[in-house]
Amino acid sequence: MRSLVCLIRSAGILLMLAIFPAAHAAELNADAQAFVQEMVERHGFQRAALERMLRETKFLSSIVRAMDAPATALPWREFRPRHINDARFEGGLRFWAEHAALLERAATEYRVAPEIIVATIGIETLYGRNTGRVSVLDALATLAFGYPRRAAFFRGELEQFLLLARENGWPPGSVRGSFAGAIGVPQFLPSSYRKYAVDFDGDGRSDLRGIADAIGSVANYYRGFGWRMGEPVVIPADVGSTVLDPLLAAGIAPHLAVGEFRKRGVLPLEPVPDETPAALIAVETDTGPRHFLALNNFYVITRYNRSINYAMAVQELAATLRQLRGRGAP
């Protein structure tokens, strides 16, 4: 078995070498050539310069490994303490205090709760402290041409990144971010950067390296996906002896009214109107599964990261920060 694994890995390395040839090689592989052709035809890029840039990118095997083992795939009982902890609480309260005026303005203009903005930035980059050190160009090229499972998606992000870099006058190789190619304080992928980033400090640029633009852009992102100010995110539920598999398999998009869940034996443990659309979700805790009715705002958070764990962490951090700030915590 070990020899088979080694053989598969060796074949994978040879494939990557074909995709990321040495600088002296005459040709890119077929996928990269097709990408170059599209960029030339659709966006007017210079063929020779783009081919040279792609030849100089580095295949980062660590990125492929990270994509195949994301932290969000951990059980909730392991994922939660990494993100819901004193460092996140203390940092969030400081961040909120330092940028209270910006957060209130964003909440007013975009109708998104300030604690959700703070929590999202806290989960993503520890309030702007960890924005990533990986070359975004290398990361996206690795995933676009060396990660077949999601290659089409990341070729689209590579396209958006090159357009973003051209629009902002950035040398593409100079931009640093996450292993998945996310950029800045709120960790936007290039397509989201181009669509949702805003100039919230009025300096004429939408720069997600800055806190003001990051705050406004996160709020704009959530508004764009339908955040509803003042509505809850999740409601804890008692599932009793309900047969859960069909309800859980239906996915995280709200699809069934709370009243229908009641009829099937899923009882919300907090007040919520029967006509409210919801989905049933479960997380694994130390004492077994816990169940929640996930509402519209939960689904909106998953448009940022399509992980139940991620959305649960954002909502719990947000709720805790709101509570602590209301108590006047330092």
Image (cartoon, grey):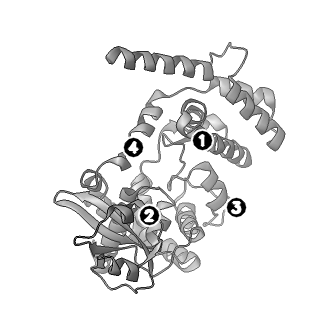
Viewer-side residue, 170 vs 271: 271
Tell me the amino acid under the disc marked 4.
Answer: Pro
Tell me the amino acid under the disc marked 1.
Answer: Phe
Q: Which residue is mark 1?
A: 154
- Location of residue 88 (image quadrant): bottom left
Residue 252 - label: 2
Q: How many neighbours does mark 3 have within 10 angstroms: few (below 14), some (14-19), or many (20 or more)? A: few
The mark tally for this picture is 4
Residue 61 pos. (x, y %): 47, 27
- Tell me whether the residue at label 3 lies in contact with that at label 4, contact meaning CB atoms closer than 8 angstroms: no
Q: Which residue is mark 4?
A: 70
Q: Secondary structure at mark 1?
A: helix
- N-term-proximal mark, 4 vs 2: 4
| Image side of residue 328 versus residue 208, left or right | left
Q: Residue at x 60, y 41 (%)?
A: 154
Q: Nearer the viewer, mark 4 or mark 2?
A: 2
Tell me the amino acid under the disc marked 3.
Answer: Gly
- N-term-proximal mark, 1 vs 4: 4
Q: Which residue is mark 3?
A: 204
Tell me the amino acid under the disc marked 2.
Answer: Ile
Q: Residue at x 74, y 31 (%)?
A: 34
Q: Residue at x 72, y 45 (%)?
A: 163
Q: Nearer the viewer, mark 1 or mark 2?
A: 2
Q: How many neighbours does mark 2 have within 10 angstroms: few (below 14), some (14-19), or many (20 or more)? A: many
